[in-house]
């Protein structure tokens, strides 16, 4: 079985990459991803200026996944722009990392994307729609009018490949509304899903929360969210123009989990909690396990089964 994957005109050895935010904050971490078995990789969502993020503890792992309220710690977008432009100059392997953007306001998103548009960066940009909105309003991904307004403004000037990182949706009306909005734009892809927002993990022994920010509330990842992630991958795969690809993120910790996301229609696969917990070697294990699953089922390539989820 081979895991060769073509995505946005670029050929990758396999569909695996890190989820933005995990193992991608510094040049060292990005270089480790570059040298790893990951097929592709992406930078930590960047803001205009460097951010320290929230006070620690801000991440906690459990038997079934993780909870985080990192608070968008990052080195500032110029740090990552320097990295990706330098990468594409020196490494013509075409594996320049995807560039993730999460402005703390609509204007900040527009400003950063304008600079990317004017820059030498030729790779893929991912706009994180879980970025905050005006106080009192839900995150942008849950404010459908704001989502449409931002994308309308972005596509007036942005001409490079752009994907959006979506929060999970839980209602068929929302799948339909959001897909109808996204289908209006020349998007390269949607990335389903970001962490399931504002969960709460309680440690019964200490009778306490486990992370400091937001009184313990944080985004949930890992095994907890795989059914939600698969549902969102499938919902958008079946609703979007076929020109808009789907990246599957959420609960990928084994070759079988990867297979399930591909069966639902994903092309690239992002790994968050499992990478955070296991480290960079997770990609070697996932590659081996996915090949085993495919071989057992008699598949030589991913194309033979991508999106072919059967219903009863
Ligand atoms: C939640 C935000 C801080 C607004 C965006 C960054 C982010 C974070 C984070 O930096 O806390 N964690 C996630 O699981 N997903 C995200 O998109």
Image (cartoon, helix red, strand yellow):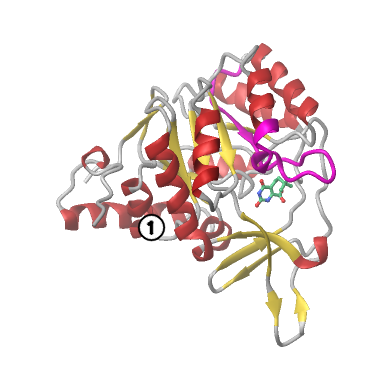
Say whether residue 203 is left or right of residue 164: right
The residue furthest bottom is 205
**Frontmost residue, 240 versus 58:** 240
Q: Is residue 113 above or below residue 41?
A: above
**Frontmost residue, 197 versus 278:** 197
Please give the range of residues in magenta. 121-146
Please tell me whether residue 61 belongs to the stretch shown in magenta: no
Q: Quadrant of the C terminus?
A: bottom left
Image position, residue 83 (x, y; %): 65, 29
Decide if residue 38 is in sight here.
no
Please tell me whether residue 133 belongs to the stretch shown in magenta: yes
Report helix, strand or loop for mark 1: helix
Say whether residue 126 is left or right of residue 135: left
Q: Is residue 89 above or below residue 16?
A: above
Q: Is residue 18 above or below residue 47?
A: below
Say whether residue 294 is left or right of residue 187: left
Task: Quickly name the residue at label 1.
Answer: 257
Decide if residue 65 is in sight here.
yes
The structure residue drawn at horizontal position 52% and vertical position 22%, both measured from the top left corner, is 184
Mostly what secondary structure, the magenta segment? loop
Q: Is residue 6 above or below residue 186?
A: below
The residue furthest front is 173
Number of numbered callouts drawn: 1
């Amino acid at each position: 079985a081979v895991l060769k994957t073509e995505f946005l005109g670029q050929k990758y050895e396999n569909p695996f990459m890190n989820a933005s935010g995990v193992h991608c904050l510094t040049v060292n971490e990005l270089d480790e991803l570059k040298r790893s078995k990951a097929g592709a990789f992406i930078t930590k969502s960047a803001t205009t200026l460097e951010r320290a993020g929230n006070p620690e503890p801000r991440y906690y792992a459990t038997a079934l996944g993780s909870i985080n309220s990192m608070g968008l710690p990052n080195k500032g977008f110029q740090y990552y722009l320097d990295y990706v432009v330098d990468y594409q100059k020196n490494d013509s392997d075409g594996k320049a990392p995807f560039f993730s953007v999460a402005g703390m306001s609509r204007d900040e998103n527009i400003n950063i994307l304008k600079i990317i548009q004017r820059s030498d960066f030729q790779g893929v940009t991912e706009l994180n729609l879980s970025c905050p909105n005006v106080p009192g309003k839900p995150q942008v991904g849950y404010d459908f009018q704001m989502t449409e307004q931002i994308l309308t403004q972005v596509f007036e000037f942005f001409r490079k490949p752009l994907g959006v990182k979506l929060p999970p949706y839980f209602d068929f009306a929302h799948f339909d509304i959001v897909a109808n909005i996204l289908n209006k734009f020349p998007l390269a892809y949607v990335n389903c899903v970001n962490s399931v927002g504002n969960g709460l993990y309680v440690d019964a022994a200490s009778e306490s929360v486990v992370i400091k920010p937001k009184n313990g509330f944080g985004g949930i990842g890992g095994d907890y969210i795989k059914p939600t992630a698969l549902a969102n991958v499938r919902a958008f795969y079946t609703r979007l123009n076929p020109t808009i690809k789907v990246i599957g993120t959420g609960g990928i910790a084994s070759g079988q989990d990867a297979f399930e996301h591909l069966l639902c229609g994903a092309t690239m696969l992002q790994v968050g909690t499992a990478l955070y917990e296991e480290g960079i070697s997770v990609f070697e294990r996932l590659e081996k396990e996915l090949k085993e699953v495919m071989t057992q089922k008699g598949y030589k390539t991913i194309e033979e089964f991508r999106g072919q989820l059967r219903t009863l």
